[in-house]
Image: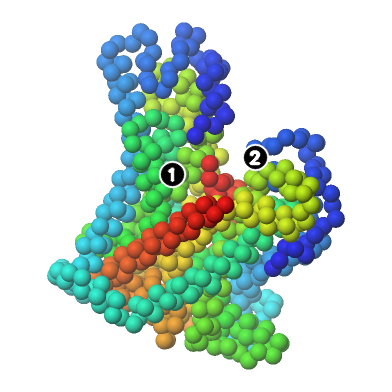
């Protein structure tokens, strides 16, 4: 991965590099640590040691903190998922083997949460990404105040899950809510969003869509701006209209970016938690009075800190991770297929 | 929303940049057609959809609970805004929460930017054994959901007697795989290798190189990463609501408390939501351009 600047560096004399360069020291160092001439041997040894050890010292903080708070807990979670761990008696951890997992697979609430996660994931991700491509296309025109448009589209991303959900909950409220009031103008009876099955899922998805569409639009916009203009020009010479150019130049060139956003959105959808928790109000951790929008993340939280069964919560966490890996593998296979078919 | 109806009569390639032809390897090399009126209309509608919920939060926060339960809902400001903000600040604990969130998000931002720059520099410019494997590992960690760590973290926290203390929320998020990768991508192209070599020839130690060469070169990306990290840390939800309670909350924990109903007054809840979002809105007004740029840079994988 050499950039053009690095390629230049191979030929450029190093004397133009740094101010304060001593004229005698204009030898190439090749990054392997030739010590400056005229130093004592312990200094050159120290210098060589510095060259060897410093890269590891620079990456150490990341790996130490991530190891301690990410990797080790991940293994511990696997360990706890094979034990009975209760919030009420943290010191009494007994081995139960795969009981937690069996328990999980025979629980209707688990399957309900899996289904809800999938449904809400699809109805929040697909429209979001389709709209994001459309918005990116619009933002790609030469606009007056283009930066302002971009910042405005990104504003929902700055709104936290909690704040956004509290506002949308009020907008969706059964009596006196803005959305039911607007619906009555088009002759639709008020909908009990919080209690109904599809209504709650739709409402939760709309919060996700509102928060993330602008963010994804900017990612697509960045990719669109990197598409060489001559591709469009040659397409135009071949007589392709605007819509055909969009379909046959823009969308294929965006394919890697689309895959990237699909993966990131999938990871996000699998972990969906805050929106349904707050939308449910008092019965939040149940995901509504009939668990109608209880997602896997919410189910784990409810089992662990609502009911107090941390062993089972650990099993749910690992199951979520396995589902993510399966989804990622499917994504990879689809991409390979698409590449081969071209 | 189809884009087919947005056909425009302009000719292609009317570039207004002084006719510098050739492929510019930077952003903005896409087709630069002037937007027509239809585009502006559609964008205006989308901008309203983006901003309306926030504007309405302010409207609802300026009313009272009775008014919010009536139909039609209020469409303009009432006179209770400052009263409700005061109530949210004092009684709903948003005051303490704001201070806590500033401490938490500030510390996380500082740590993430520092450690990401160091690690990003090592991955971008230094040769060491296993570097590509370790970089792949770093990117791979982005796949791991936070749910996988919270049970052990919770148990350790209880053992240490750290329940409800801010360091519990700060420590696990003090580094970032995304940040490390982001800084690496930036430094690969922004930091000339000959600068490092020249400093080496002068016999500068690694720390001197970092201080005098790497940090100055990385400064723009550090600012952008800092902004993005602050937004993420301020809005972090899952681990804080497990680790902290209403005695010592961050803003998100306090809002979660409001949502689960120990203050039944909707106008105060809206005032709380407004307060909790305000610092980020101000950041957006001041640094929106940099934040947008950061997200767009992060999207282009080198």
Identify which residue is drawn at 30% across, 53% down. Answer: A71
Is B299 or B100 nearer to us in this picture?
B299
Q: Secondary structure at mark 1?
A: helix
Examine the rendering and report whether any part of residue B40 can be seen: no
Q: Residue at x 76, y 54 (%)?
A: A240
Q: Earlier in the sequence, mark 2 or mark 1?
A: 2
Locate residue B246 relative to residue B235 in the image: left or right. Answer: left
Write down the chain letter for disc 2.
B
Relative to A100, residue B97 above or below: above
Q: Which residue is mark 2?
A: B26
User: Label for residue B180?
Assistant: 1
- x and y, in percent, of residue B89 in the image: 50, 69
Q: Residue furthest front?
A: A341
Classify residue A229 as left or right of residue A18.
right
> Image quadrant for the N terminus of chain B?
bottom right
Mark 2 to mark 1 CA distance (whole Å): 22 Å
Image coordinates for residue B130, horizontal then vertical, percent: 33, 36
Say the numbered circle drawn on residue A192: none
For marks 2 and 1, give the one nearer the viewer.
2
The residue drawn where x is 45% and y is 56% is A332
10 Å crowding of disc 1: few (<14), some (14-19), many (20+): many
Q: Residues within 10 Å of mark 2 (few under 14, many from 20)?
A: few
């Amino acid at each position: 991965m050499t950039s053009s600047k690095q390629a230049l560096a191979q030929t450029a004399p190093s004397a133009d590099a740094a101010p304060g360069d001593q004229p005698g020291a204009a030898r190439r160092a090749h990054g392997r640590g030739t010590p400056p001439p005229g130093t004592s041997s312990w200094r050159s040894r120290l210098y060589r040691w510095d060259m060897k050890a410093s890269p590891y010292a620079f990456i150490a903080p990341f790996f130490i903190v991530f190891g301690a708070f990410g990797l080790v807990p991940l293994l511990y979670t696997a360990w706890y998922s094979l034990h009975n761990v209760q919030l009420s008696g943290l010191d009494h951890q007994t081995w139960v083997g795969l009981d937690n997992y069996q328990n999980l697979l025979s629980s209707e609430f688990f399957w309900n949460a899996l289904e809800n996660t999938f449904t809400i994931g699809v109805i929040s991700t697909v429209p979001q990404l389709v709209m994001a491509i459309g918005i990116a296309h619009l933002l790609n025109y030469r606009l007056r105040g283009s930066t302002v448009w971009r910042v405005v589209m990104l504003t929902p991303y700055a709104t936290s899950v909690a704040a956004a959900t509290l506002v949308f909950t009020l907008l969706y409220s059964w009596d006196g809510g803005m959305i039911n009031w607007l619906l009555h103008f088009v002759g639709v009876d008020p909908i009990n969003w919080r209690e109904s099955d599809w209504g709650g899922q739709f409402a939760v998805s709309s919060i996700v869509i509102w928060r993330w569409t602008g963010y994804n639009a900017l990612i697509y916009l960045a990719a669109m701006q990197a598409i060489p203009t001559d591709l469009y020009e040659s397409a135009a010479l071949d007589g392709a209209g605007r819509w055909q150019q969009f379909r046959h130049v823009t969308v294929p060139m965006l394919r890697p970016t689309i895959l990237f956003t699909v993966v990131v959105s999938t990871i996000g959808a699998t972990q969906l938690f805050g929106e349904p928790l707050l939308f449910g109000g008092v019965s939040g951790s149940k995901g509504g009075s009939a668990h109608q929008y209880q997602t896997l993340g919410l189910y784990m939280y409810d089992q662990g800190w609502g009911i107090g069964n941390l062993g089972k919560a650990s099993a749910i966490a690992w199951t979520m991770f396995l589902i993510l890996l399966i989804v990622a593998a499917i994504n990879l296979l689809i991409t390979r297929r698409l590449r081969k078919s071209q | 929303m189809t884009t087919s109806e947005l056909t425009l009569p302009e000719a292609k390639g009317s570039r207004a940049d002084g006719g510098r032809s050739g492929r510019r390897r930077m952003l903005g090399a896409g087709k630069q057609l002037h937007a027509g009126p239809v585009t502006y209309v559609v964008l205006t509608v989308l901008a309203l959809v983006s901003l309306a919920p926030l504007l309405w939060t302010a409207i609802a926060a300026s009313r009272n609970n009775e008014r919010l339960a009536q139909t039609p809902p209020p469409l303009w400001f009432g006179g209770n805004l400052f009263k409700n903000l005061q109530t949210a600040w004092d009684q709903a604990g948003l005051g303490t929460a704001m201070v806590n969130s500033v401490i938490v998000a500030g510390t996380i931002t500082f740590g993430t930017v520092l450690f990401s720059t160091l690690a990003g520099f090592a991955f971008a410019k230094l040769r060491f054994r296993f570097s590509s494997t370790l970089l792949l590992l770093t990117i791979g960690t982005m796949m791991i959901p936070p749910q996988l760590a919270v049970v052990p973290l919770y148990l350790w926290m209880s053992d240490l007697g750290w329940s409800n203390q801010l360091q519990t929320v700060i420590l696990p998020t003090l580094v970032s795989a995304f940040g490390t990768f982001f800084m690496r991508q930036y430094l690969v192209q922004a930091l000339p290798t000959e600068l490092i070599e020249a400093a080496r020839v002068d016999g500068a130690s690694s720390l001197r190189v970092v201080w005098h060469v790497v940090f100055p070169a990385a400064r723009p990306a550090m600012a952008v990463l800092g902004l993005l990290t602050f937004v993420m840390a301020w809005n972090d939800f899952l681990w804080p609501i497990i680790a902290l309670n209403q005695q010592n909350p961050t803003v998100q924990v306090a809002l979660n408390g409001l949502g689960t109903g120990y203050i039944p007054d909707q106008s105060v809840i809206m005032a709380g939501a407004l307060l909790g979002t305000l610092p980020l809105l101000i950041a957006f007004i001041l640094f929106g351009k940099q934040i947008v740029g950061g997200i767009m840079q992060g999207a282009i994988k080198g």
